[in-house]
């Protein structure tokens, strides 16, 4: 079985109404769609698939985590991933939008792997940090690094302040 075969929904055999599916999205899944993908993810996608005569309505949940280098301490950390989406797959001709896809005809089955892939990528947070990791029992962060990072950013603030004072003093000089 190819890695994406399990994303095929046998719509012909389904009655109209809602059907629930669950998919595992792991590194081989992401590579099967995008060869270059280095995503080290363990995600679950729950799909509620509403079959109607000329339209499928999908409620898609993506949740789990991916392993990435922490933006603050550079340790490898599990970054939480979560997202919730709606997708309308309509029969007909039209221009696709973020939530709407048009298919000229409905086949006996539909593979939804590429849609799930897009939503999973959309769910990745912009920042690779764990909020509140300092309070965790076994924090994955490197606190030595975090401390240095914090000291540096405080030092930067100080520099800015000193510059600010200098300008204040300069502007107090009167050129008469
Ligand atoms: Zn960290």
Image (tube, grey):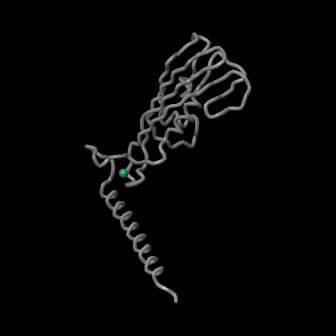
**Residue 24 x %, y %:** 47, 28
Q: Quadrant of residue 166?
A: bottom left
Residue 99 to residue 18: above or below: below
Residue 175 to residue 67: above or below: below
**Outermost residue, left direction?**
137
**Residue 26 x %, y %:** 47, 34
From the viewer's side, name the closer residue of 156 and 149. 156
- Residue visible at 45% across and 36% down? 82
Residue 133 to residue 46: above or below: below
From the viewer's side, name the closer residue of 158 and 91. 158
Residue 82 to residue 145: above or below: above
Q: How many marks?
A: 0
Q: Quadrant of residue 17?
A: top right
Horizontal side, residue 135 vs residue 22: left or right: left
Quadrant (top left/top right/bottom left/bottom right) for the N terminus = top right
**Residue 20 x %, y %:** 49, 18
- Residue visible at 34% across and 57% down? 146
**Residue 137 x %, y %:** 25, 43
**Outermost residue, bottom direction?**
176
Horizontal side, residue 142 vs residue 54: left or right: left
């Amino acid at each position: 079985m190819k890695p994406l075969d399990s994303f095929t929904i046998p719509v012909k055999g389904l009655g109209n109404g809602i059907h629930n599916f669950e998919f595992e999205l792991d590194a081989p899944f992401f590579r099967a769609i995008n060869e270059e993908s280095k995503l080290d993810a363990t995600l679950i996608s729950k799909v509620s698939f509403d079959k109607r005569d000329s339209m499928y309505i999908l409620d898609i949940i993506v949740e789990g985590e991916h392993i990435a280098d922490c933006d603050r301490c550079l340790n490898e950390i599990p970054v939480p991933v979560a997202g919730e989406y709606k997708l309308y797959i309509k029969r007909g001709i039209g221009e696709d939008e973020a939530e709407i896809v048009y298919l000229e005809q409905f086949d006996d089955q539909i593979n939804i792997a590429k849609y799930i892939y897009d939503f999973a990528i959309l769910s990745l947070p912009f920042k690779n940090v764990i909020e509140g990791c300092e309070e965790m029992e076994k924090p994955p962060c490197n606190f030595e690094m975090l401390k240095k990072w914090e000291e540096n950013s405080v030092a930067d603030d100080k520099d800015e302040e000193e510059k600010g004072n200098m300008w204040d003093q300069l502007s107090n000089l009167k050129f008469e």
